[in-house]
Image: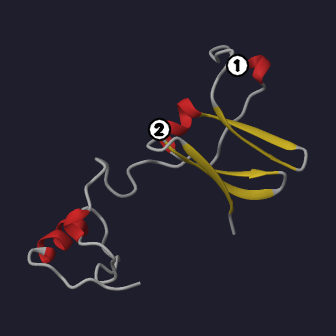
Amino acid sequence: MTALPASAGEDDIVRRFRAMGWTSTDFSRKTIALDEIISGGVSKDQIPAIDRPVFARLSKVKDIAGREPVVSLKIANDARAYPLRVMIWHEIVNDTVGGVPVAVTYCPLCNSAIAFRRT
């Protein structure tokens, strides 16, 4: 990574980032100018993850559409469906599927999902 030189006014930008909760970030290591970063509207840690998801059998759920969009994950014989109408607000679900600890992530900005093995 090539570090860019600090621009005039970057100290003010760094102060604003620190005030938003980015207190331990090393802003000297970057490949773009800090003034190119635009806030997405929420501060750090304002989107709560789901750490203890609760599931129900599809036959028991009353308010689900016939074609409900979900993020699906199957490990071994254990399958999960994470509805996008929930993922859009939380973006991360920490779960255990098939005995494997996972983080299921969803990005509503690009409509993509990725599951990671947690350690």
**How much space separates mark 2 and mark 1, taking CA atoms?**
20 Å
In the picture of the structure, the residue carrying the numbered disc 1 is: 61
At mark 2, the secondary structure is helix
The residue depicted at 24 percent of the width and 66 percent of the height is 17
In the rendered view, does 109 fall on the left or right side of 11? right
Task: Name the side, left or right, on which 51 lies relative to 22.
Answer: right
Q: Residues within 10 Å of mark 1 (few under 14, many from 20)?
A: few
Q: Say which quadrant the C terminus sits in.
A: bottom right
Q: From this view, report whether residue 23 is shown above or below residue 78.
A: below
Which one is earlier in the sequence, the residue at label 2 or at label 1?
A: 1
Instruction: Find numbered disc 1 in the image and state the secondary structure of the residue it sits on.
Output: loop
Res. 33 image quadrant = bottom left
At 73% from the left and 59% from the top, the residue drawn is 101
- Frontmost of labels 2 and 1 is 2
User: In the image, is residue 102 above or below residue 119?
Assistant: above
Q: Residue furthest left?
A: 8
| Residue 69 in picture, x, y percent from top left | 63, 28
Residue at 9% across, 78% down? 8
Image quarter hosting the N terminus: bottom left
